[in-house]
Amino acid sequence: MAAAVPASFTGLKKTDFLDKINGQKGVRMSKLQTPKSSRVRMVRVRNSSPSDIAEMEPASEGSALLVPRQKYCESIYKTVRRKTRTVMVGNVPLGSEHPIRVQTMTTTDTKDVAGTVEQVMRIADKGADLVRITVQGKREADSCYDIKNTLVQKGYDIPLVADIHFAPSVAMRVAECFDKIRVNPGNFADRRAQFEKIEYTEEDYQKELEHIEKIFAPLVEKCKKYGRAIRIGTNHGSLSDRIMSYYGDSPRGMVESTFEFARICRKLDFHNFVVSMKASNPVIMVQAYRLLVAEMNVLGWDYPLHLGVTEAGEGEDGRMKSAIGIGTLLQDGLGDTIRVSLTEAPEQEIDPCRRLANLGMQAAKLEKGVTPFEEKHRHYFDFQRRTSQLPVQKEGEEVDYRGVLHRDGSVLMSVTLDQLKTPELLYKSLATKLIVGMPFKDLATVDTILLRELPPVDDSEARLTIKRLVDISMGVLTPLSEQLTKSLAHAIVLVNVKEISTGAHKLLPEGTRLAVTLRGDEAYEDLDLIKSVDPIMLLVNLPHEEERVNRVHASRRLFEYLQENALNFPVIHHLQFPEGTHKDDLVIGAGSQAGALLVDGLGDGLMLEAQDQDFDFLRNTSFGLLQGCRMRNTKTEYVSCPSCGRTLFDLQEVSAEIREKTQHLPGVSIAIMGCIVNGPGEMADADFGYVGGAPGKIDLYVGKDVVKRGIAMEQASDALIQLIKDNGRWADPPAEE
């Protein structure tokens, strides 16, 4: 007999789970069907319409998480924008037939009408399409009328979005004024999560759903009456205890939380809504959106998506996290409006947001991709890093090649002849530790360098500089032509497919280590050539001039080939940026092109090149990308909210102070939150939390648990450091040489 489960069926684990919620409306699931292959379990899932049938399978071999077999995007081999309905937010149409809309959020006190109006005007003047304003209570809701009227009088008609938590009555009030209402399903009708495991009977669970409908339905009806839009804005950090008891603090729980509210909208024939699935961890965020879209595709739903990474932070780190999460989804044609959340003035978010939107729009406009191929090995919904064979030592080799790549992700850098002339400066640029002028590897030292040009054979000083790097197991790559004319002992020689096909590499001494550079879209017979040379690594380098070939899809095609042929060579994503590339474009380009592969576990490192960019900037960006993709952790991680009208202190100033005192603690994650509105779950990835508890007062957390309350601001940062020490995670800053 079939068990009935909610219309979102992500992550169903066992039949006893199905029995627990039997009796609800939604998808019908029949008995498990045994396919011919023992590797795949499939479940046939049927919605109320006989034509809506989904096949379920484990997210990966042996996984208990069942996911839809339907693809989460329009095409796996090119960027095709997902088709959605149009949602009107004031006078701004949003959806796949329209440009990707950019937005931000005010940081002023909403009761400060003049200050909020001034900030909204600055945001609008920067080119934002929408602006969100926090509305905590009745006084703030009353101020919204004055804000709206003042903006209209000043000639600004930018749509305004009310950000609502815990306050259904406030949402009802402001719906008469603002163009869109953002509700958080985790706290709109539920109490704040206490992280308690609750056992529900069928009757109890159904009563909770009825309670949600009772609270939410009046707002839906009001928005329908006034022509307003709704965003069902789910946060990874603020799921209800009910959802977490059933689905865990996970992407599948986020999807179900969203669907509870979406079903109410649909039941009331209200369709002017968008959905979002935000998380501070880009990997979680990407998985959640993919699951959401896969299930909406099964149900025939076409609601637009709002994309964002919460608490991304500031500077390059904030831009990088957003580029990884948002850019990955844009490459697959997902996303209709985006926000880059930075711990900076809100108007500063618009420029990187626009750059990211343009990148996604351009890829979709050109339908950038590769020749169609079958994809069978990529894990869309759960992170599993591809297994590759790191370099091993071969008998008779005089140097240790095992250090040329790092098991958690490698960083390669291009070095010039001029840099070789100042050895000590070069060693510092490579982030080695210097002891009496000699380099040694440190936590965030570059693993391998590329010398496009070798120094003359008689340049003993430059060659000694290189030898000292080789002696500490740093790899040295150089092109075949250079090695044949200016041979460098122990160099790893970079060859291309053409050089392999002509046999040019055979001119090298036997035993020379090789690396192969590829575009990713070569003919399969050309890719077969790499089997004959046993490369130490592959570098995927698609020229930036290519307008129609997509680096992400070309690389996925290459990884598919490698998996099908059981080839476990390490793969480095090699991105070259043209002269004049803006720093934000470089960060966003690297995050959305290399990051889109690394979040799926595809790749072992990267090399960024840009001739006119600072060497340290490129190195730091590379390590930041690896850390943002949850690979190699080389610096303190900050989960920092972008501030809003709820913020209880100067977030930018405090963030800078805490960073200055704690930035030397790799492996430690610190959340800096203006308030706790999204719940302590928003700090799920953080070891320690510094949170505004009341005006002038700070609460400190270890994980999700508050351990100290009401600390005066003046003592709070020192108290945080003491807390880190008490938990054995502190180290004194390294002494200056």
Image (tube, rainbow, N blue to C red):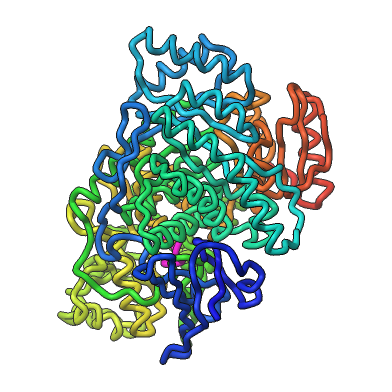
Residue 603 at least partly seen = no
Q: Which residues lie in the magenta part?
A: 599-608
Quadrant position of the N terminus in the picture: bottom right
Q: Is residue 202 magenta?
A: no
Q: Main secondary structure of the magenta part?
A: loop
Residue 142: percent from the left, percent from the top?
57, 15
Q: Which residue shows up at 33% across the image and 67% down it? A: 556
Residue 554: percent from the left, percent from the top?
27, 65
Would you identify the image quadrant in which residue 466 lies?
A: bottom left
Q: Is 305 left or right of 691, judged from the image as shown?
A: left
In this rendered view, identify the residue nearer to me: 368 or 206: 206
Q: Is residue 600 magenta?
A: yes
Q: Is 484 left or right of 674, judged from the image as shown?
A: left
Residue 17 at least partly seen = yes
Q: Which residue shows up at 66% across the image and 70% down it? A: 20
Would you identify the image quadrant in which residue 17 lies?
A: bottom right
Residue 130: percent from the left, percent from the top?
39, 29
In the picture shown, does residue 210 fall above or below 231?
below
In the picture shown, does residue 41 fall above or below 517?
below
Would you identify the image quadrant in which residue 155 lies?
A: top left
Quadrant position of the C terminus in the picture: top right
Residue 85: percent from the left, percent from the top?
31, 46
In this rendered view, identify the residue nearer to me: 438 or 376: 376
